[in-house]
Image (cartoon, rainbow, N blue to C red):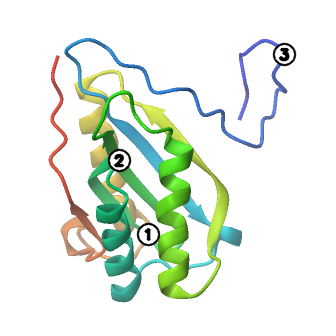
């Protein structure tokens, strides 16, 4: 991945986590990708799915909206439940720790990728891409057949 930020290396290996911006009268929705350490395919199980949902409910500073759990990574949309928001790194570290403890294993890659959505269209486009991941990976014939997906909270986009 190339960077156009001054004084940044051209092939940055780790994401930059920019602070979440509050924009008057607009929803704050962040798109996250969180991967397993070494891309271990351990996430797409009923037990892990339950553990993730339980951890997300416990980690109440951010609300999880739509999500897809793939074997080695998770895509999810989230929004702060309080303003100013708790830093994403704090929230993600918390629920990753809860899941690791409940599963009695260390499974998470240290970092994550995040993008704050700027437009309603990007939310809809990203969701269509994410929900079709299991189909593109050959795990199901139709996106709706993938059992490790859902929506925990409705994240509404306001313009």
Q: Position of residue 130 (x, y in %)?
A: 35, 53
| Nearest to N terminus: mark 2 or mark 3 | 3
- 66 or 130, which is in the foreground? 66
Q: Residue 36: which quarter of the image?
A: bottom right
Mark whose residue sits in front, 2 or 3: 2
User: What residue sits 84% from the left and 27% below the top?
Assistant: 9
Q: Which residue is mark 2?
A: 61
User: What residue sits 38% from the left and 71% below the top?
Assistant: 52
Contact, mark 1 vs mark 2 (Cβ under 8 Å): no
What label does residue 7 carry, if any? 3
Residue 129 in sight from this viewpoint = no
**SS of the residue at dot 1?**
loop
User: What residue sits 33% from the left and 64% below the top?
Assistant: 58
What label does residue 70 carry, if any? 1
**SS of the residue at dot 3?**
loop
Q: In this rendering, is residue 52 above or below 30?
A: below
- How would you rate the neighbour count of disc 3 (Cα within 10 Å): few for under 14, some for 14-19, many for 20 or more? few
Give how far apart the Cα atoms at labels 2 and 3 are.
33 Å
């Amino acid at each position: 991945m190339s960077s156009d930020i001054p004084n940044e290396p051209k092939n940055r290996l780790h994401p930059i986590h920019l602070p979440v911006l509050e924009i008057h009268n607009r929803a704050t929705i962040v798109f996250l990708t969180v991967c397993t350490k070494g891309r271990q395919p351990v996430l797409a199980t009923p037990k892990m799915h339950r553990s993730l949902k339980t951890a997300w409910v416990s980690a109440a500073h951010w609300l999880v909206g739509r999500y897809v759990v793939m074997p080695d990574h998770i895509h999810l949309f989230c929004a702060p439940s309080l303003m100013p928001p708790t830093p994403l790194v704090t929230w993600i570290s918390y629920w990753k720790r809860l899941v690791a403890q409940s599963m009695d294993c260390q499974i998470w890659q240290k970092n994550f990728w995040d993008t704050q959505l700027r437009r309603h269209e990007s939310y809809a486009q990203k969701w269509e891409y994410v929900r079709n991941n299991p189909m593109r990976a050959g795990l199901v014939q139709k996106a709706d057949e993938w059992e490790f997906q859902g929506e925990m909270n409705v994240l509404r986009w306001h313009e």
